[in-house]
Image (spheres, rainbow, N blue to C red):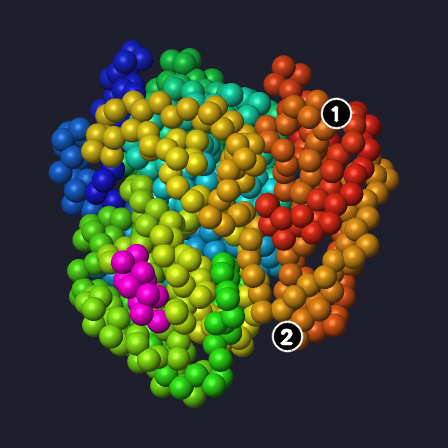
C-alpha cells in the first residue's frame, strides 16, 4: 500500500498539538478470549441492546478508548520512512494477524474480543508481502452482481465469511456498494454495478452471508467514492435529493438487507467535507434518518481530525498509522477531558461497537485460527457456481455452445493456458496453488500489484471437456496468431483488462488484445471472444466476431466456469449489472476529473450532472444507444412470458408474470420489471428497475414469479420534509430482458402516497 499519502487536517489547527505515539496498551492475549462466565452481559438470552448497556457501564474510560482505535496489521517499511510522523517506528501489534488489514484491542477483563480485521469482498485477502494466506476467491463483486441471484450472493458471502472466521478474523471489510458513476473507476470490480436496487440487494445478501458466521461485515465506501483518481482529496459534489435516490439508496438497501454491524466511511470528500467527518452523511443520514445502530469505521488513512470527526459521527479510527495522527487515542481522551467532545459521544462509539459484536454473535463465538478446517473443495464449488451464474453471453451468432463436431479449437491470448485474472489492491486474495504468471513481470510490482492469476486454466478445463484438439497460442505475435487461427474450426481469443485499487482504467483491453482480436477475426469468422474485465470496455472489433462472453474476474474456479459455459455444460445466465457505453462522449463526464499524478489537487467532481440518472437512466434520458444495455445477457435456450399482471393491494405494487422455457435446454432467465412514472412525477430519468427474479427452468417448464416494488422506487425524495412521495397517475410497468427492451407492458394507476425517510 505504498501509494497512501493521505492529506491532513491537523489537530494542531484546532488548538491542539498532539504527539503521535502508539498508545502503550496492556498486552491482550494472542488468541480469542472467552467472556467471563456469569457476568450479566454474557447471558445470550438477553438481546444485544440490553447486553450492550450492561457491559458499557462496567467499562473504564481507557477501555472505551481502546475500542475506538484501530491499527494497521502489516509491517511495512515505507510507514517508517514517512517524514510526516516523526520518530515513527511502526510495528503491528503482536496480537494481530500477519499481513492483514487491521487490528483493534479488546478488553479481556470483560470478555470483549480483539477485532481482527481482514479485507474484503471476494475473500480473505492478504496485504502485499512475503507469505500471503492462500484462500478461495469469489468472482469479483461485479460478477456476483451479474448473477442477479440473491441466493448465490448469500452463499458466496457465507463461504468467504467462513474462511475469515477459520483464519482468525472477526471483522470482514467487505460490502462494496459504490454505484458505477464512472466506468473508468479502477475499483468497479469490487462493487455491485450501477443500479441502487440490484447493487443494494446483491451486496446486502453477501453481507448477510458473511455475518451468518458470527463475524462483523462492513458496507463501504460511504459514500460517493466513485473514482480512484485523487481519491484522498477529490470532492464528490451532489445534492441531497439526487443522492438519496441513487448512491445513498444503494447503501440503504444494502443495510436493510444485510444489517452490517459496521459502515466504512470513504476517503473522498463529499460536498467538500471529508466523508469521515461529514455530520450530514454520518450523523444525519446514516444514524438519524436510517436509524443505523452499528458503528462507523474510517477507511485506512481517511481520518483527518479528532474533534470534527468524533463529533460528526465517526466511531472508530482504522489502520493507524495510515492517518497522520493517532486522532482517536490520546488526542480523543484529551478532547473529552477538555470538553470538545462530549463523554456521551465516546460512550456512543463504544456502545455501537459493542452492539456490533453482540448482534452478530462475534462477542460469543471466539475466532481461534483453525485454517486446517477450511473445506477448500466445498468452497471451490461455491465460487464456481457464482462464476457460472455471473458469466454474461453478450453476443452469439451461433458459435456457442461449441459444436461437438469441432475437430480443432485454437485458443489465443490472455494467459488462458495458465489461469484467470483477478483485480488488484487491498481486496487481493491469493489463491491456492500460487500465482502462475508471477515471473512474467505483468502489472505494477508494488501495490496495487502484483498482477495475480488463479491457476485454473480455461485451456485445461476445455481440454477436459472436448474431443477436439485444443491448441494454445500466446498471441504475442499477432501474425503468428493469425496463422494459427486459420483453418481452426473455432478460435477463442481471451482478452483481459486488469484493474486495481488506486488507479482508474481505460476502457480497453490490456496489451495487444484489441488488435489481436481484430486480426484473428478477419482471418477466421468463427472467432469467439472471452473477456475478463473489471467492468465495461469498448469493443472496436465487435462486428467481426461471432460471439462474446464476459467472464469478469471469475475467481479461483474461473477457468472451469468459463469452459463449462463455452461447451454448454452450463447455459449462461448472467445479465449486465452495468451499461457498456459505445464511446466516451456518451458519458456524463467524457473526461475523467482530476490529475492522477497529483496527491494534493482538490478535484471537484460534479455528480449533479447526472444526479440520480446513473448508467442506463442517463442513456435513457439522453436517448443514447449503448454498446450493450444494462440487464442484457443471452442464453442457450429461449423464454416466453405470459400473464403479466399488476396489483396494488395493501399499498404495494406487485407484478407477476409466468415464465416458460420454450427452448431445448435447461437454463435460467432473469425477467426484469422496470417502472416508468408520468412526466409530472419529475423522475430523474424515464424508467427505473423496480424488481427482478431469477428462475431456473427445464425445457417446457413454467413458473410464475412475483415482484414487489419498493415504494422508494416509485417515489421522489423531498429533502425538506425528508419524505418519499409517490405522485398520483398512470405508471407503466415494463417487463423486459434489458433496460432497452420491452417484452410486454401494462399500465397501473397509483394514488398519491407519502412514505417516511426509511420508506415506511
Ligand atoms: C483501503 C481500501 O479502500 C479499503 O477498502 C480497505 O478495506 C482498507 N484499505 C484496508 O485494507
**Residue 463 percent coordinates (x, y):** 39, 82
The answer to whether 564 appears left or right of 92 in the picture is right
Quadrant assignment, res 660: bottom right
Residue extending farthest top: 15
Q: Quadrant of the N terminus?
A: top left
Identify the residue shown where x is 35% and y is 79%.
488
Q: Position of residue 114 (x, y in %)?
A: 42, 47
> Which residue is the site of mark 1?
727
User: For the residue labelled by badge 1, is the local secondary structure a helix, a strand or a loop?
Assistant: loop
Per the picture, the main secondary structure of the magenta-coloured stretch is: helix
- The reply to whether discs 2 and 1 touch (Cβ–Cβ < 8 Å) is no
- The residue positioned 24% from the left and 68% from the top of the image is 475
Q: Which residue bears the numbered disc 2?
A: 665
> Mark 2: few, some, or many residues within 10 Å (few <14, many ≥20)?
some
Percent position (x, y) of residue 540?
Answer: 36, 52
Decide which of 97, 471 is in the foreground and name it.
Answer: 471
Number of marks in picture: 2
The residue under the point 50% across, 42% down is: 625
In the image, 43 versus 705, the foreground residue is: 705
User: In terms of image quadrants, where is residue 46?
Assistant: top right
Amino acid at each position: 500500500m505504498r501509494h497512501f499519502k493521505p492529506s491532513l487536517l491537523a489537530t494542531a489547527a484546532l488548538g491542539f498539538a498532539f504527539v503521535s505515539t502508539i498508545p502503550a496498551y496492556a498486552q491482550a492475549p494472542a488468541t480469542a478470549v472467552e467472556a467471563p462466565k456469569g457476568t450479566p452481559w454474557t447471558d445470550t438470552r438477553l438481546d444485544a441492546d440490553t447486553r450492550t448497556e450492561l457491559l458499557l457501564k462496567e467499562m473504564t474510560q481507557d477501555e472505551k478508548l481502546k475500542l475506538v482505535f484501530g491499527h494497521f496489521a502489516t509491517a511495512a517499511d515505507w510507514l517508517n520512512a514517512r517524514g510526516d510522523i516523526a520518530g515513527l517506528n511502526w510495528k503491528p501489534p503482536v496480537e494481530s494477524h500477519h499481513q492483514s488489514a487491521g487490528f483493534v484491542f479488546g478488553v479481556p477483563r470483560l470478555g470483549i474480543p480483539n477485532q481482527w480485521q481482514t479485507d474484503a469482498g471476494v475473500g480473505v485477502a492478504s496485504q502485499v508481502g512475503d507469505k500471503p494466506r492462500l484462500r478461495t476467491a469469489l468472482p469479483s463483486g461485479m460478477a456476483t452482481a451479474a448473477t442477479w441471484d440473491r441466493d448465490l450472493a448469500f452463499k458466496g458471502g457465507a463461504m468467504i465469511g467462513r474462511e475469515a472466521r477459520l483464519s482468525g478474523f472477526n471483522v470482514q471489510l467487505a460490502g462494496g456498494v459504490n454505484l458505477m458513476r464512472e466506468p473508468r473507476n479502477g475499483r468497479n470490480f469490487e462493487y455491485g454495478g450501477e443500479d441502487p436496487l440490484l447493487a443494494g440487494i446483491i451486496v446486502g445478501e453477501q453481507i448477510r452471508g458473511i455475518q451468518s458466521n458470527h463475524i462483523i461485515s462492513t458496507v463501504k465506501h460511504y459514500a460517493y467514492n466513485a473514482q480512484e483518481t485523487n481519491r484522498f482529496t477529490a470532492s464528490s459534489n451532489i445534492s441531497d435529493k439526487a443522492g438519496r435516490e441513487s448512491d445513498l439508496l444503494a447503501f440503504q438497501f444494502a443495510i436493510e438487507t444485510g444489517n452490517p454491524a459496521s459502515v466504512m466511511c470513504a476517503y473522498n470528500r463529499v460536498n467538500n467535507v471529508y466523508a469521515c467527518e461529514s455530520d450530514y452523511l454520518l450523523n444525519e443520514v446514516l444514524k438519524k434518518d436510517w436509524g443505523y445502530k452499528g458503528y462507523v469505521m474510517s477507511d485506512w488513512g481517511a481520518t483527518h481530525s479528532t474533534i470534527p470527526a468524533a463529533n460528526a459521527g465517526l466511531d472508530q479510527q482504522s489502520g493507524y498509522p495510515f492517518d497522520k495522527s493517532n486522532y482517536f487515542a490520546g488526542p480523543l481522551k484529551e478532547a473529552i477531558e477538555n470538553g470538545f467532545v462530549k463523554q456521551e459521544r465516546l460512550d456512543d462509539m463504544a456502545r455501537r461497537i459493542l452492539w456490533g459484536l453482540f448482534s452478530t454473535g462475534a462477542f460469543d463465538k471466539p475466532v481461534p485460527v483453525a485454517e486446517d478446517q477450511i473445506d477448500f473443495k466445498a468452497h471451490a464449488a461455491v465460487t464456481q457456481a457464482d462464476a457460472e451464474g455471473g458469466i454474461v453471453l453478450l453476443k452469439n451468432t451461433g458459435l456457442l455452445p461449441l459444436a461437438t463436431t469441432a475437430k480443432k479449437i485454437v485458443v489465443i491470448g490472455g494467459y488462458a493456458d495458465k489461469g484467470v485474472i483477478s483485480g488488484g489492491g487491498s481486496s487481493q486474495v491469493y489463491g491456492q496453488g500460487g500465482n502462475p504468471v508471477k515471473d512474467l513481470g505483468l502489472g505494477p510490482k508494488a501495490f496495487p500489484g502484483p498482477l495475480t492469476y488463479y491457476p485454473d486454466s480455461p485451456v485445461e478445463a476445455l481440454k477436459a471437456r472436448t474431443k477436439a484438439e485444443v491448441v494454445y497460442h500466446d498471441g504475442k505475435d499477432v501474425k503468428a496468431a493469425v496463422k494459427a487461427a486459420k483453418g481452426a474450426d473455432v478460435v477463442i481469443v481471451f482478452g483481459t483488462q486488469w484493474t486495481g485499487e488506486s488507479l482508474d482504467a481505460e476502457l480497453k483491453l490490456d496489451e495487444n488484445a484489441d488488435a489481436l482480436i481484430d486480426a484473428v477475426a478477419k482471418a477466421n469468422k468463427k472467432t469467439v471472444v472471452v473477456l475478463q474485465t473489471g467492468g465495461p470496455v469498448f469493443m472496436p472489433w465487435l462486428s467481426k466476431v461471432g460471439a462474446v462472453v464476459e467472464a469478469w474476474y471469475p475467481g479461483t474456479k474461473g477457468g472451469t466456469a468459463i469452459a463449462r459455459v463455452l461447451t454448454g455444460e452450463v447455459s449462461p445466465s448472467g445479465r449486465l449489472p452495468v451499461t457498456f457505453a459505445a464511446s466516451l462522449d456518451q458519458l456524463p463526464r467524457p473526461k475523467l476529473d482530476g490529475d492522477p499524478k497529483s496527491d494534493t489537487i482538490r478535484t471537484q467532481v460534479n455528480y449533479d450532472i447526472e444526479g440520480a440518472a446513473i448508467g442506463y437512466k442517463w442513456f435513457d434520458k439522453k436517448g443514447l444507444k449503448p454498446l450493450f444495455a444494462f440487464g442484457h445477457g443471452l442464453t442457450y435456450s429461449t423464454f416466453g412470458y405470459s400473464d403479466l399482471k399488476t396489483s396494488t393491494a395493501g399499498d404495494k405494487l406487485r407484478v407477476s408474470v409466468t415464465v416458460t422455457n420454450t427452448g431445448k435446454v435447461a437454463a435460467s432467465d432473469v425477467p426484469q420489471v422496470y417502472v416508468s412514472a408520468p412526466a409530472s412525477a419529475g423522475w430523474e430519468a424515464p424508467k427505473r428497475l423496480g424488481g427482478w427474479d431469477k428462475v431456473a427452468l427445464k425445457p417446457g417448464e413454467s413458473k410464475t414469479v412475483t415482484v414487489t416494488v419498493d415504494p422508494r422506487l416509485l417515489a421522489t425524495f423531498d429533502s425538506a420534509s425528508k419524505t418519499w412521495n409517490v405522485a398520483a397517475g398512470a405508471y407503466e410497468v415494463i417487463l423486459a430482458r434489458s433496460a432497452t427492451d420491452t417484452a410486454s407492458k401494462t399500465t397501473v394507476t397509483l394514488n398519491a402516497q407519502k412514505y417516511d425517510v426509511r420508506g415506511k
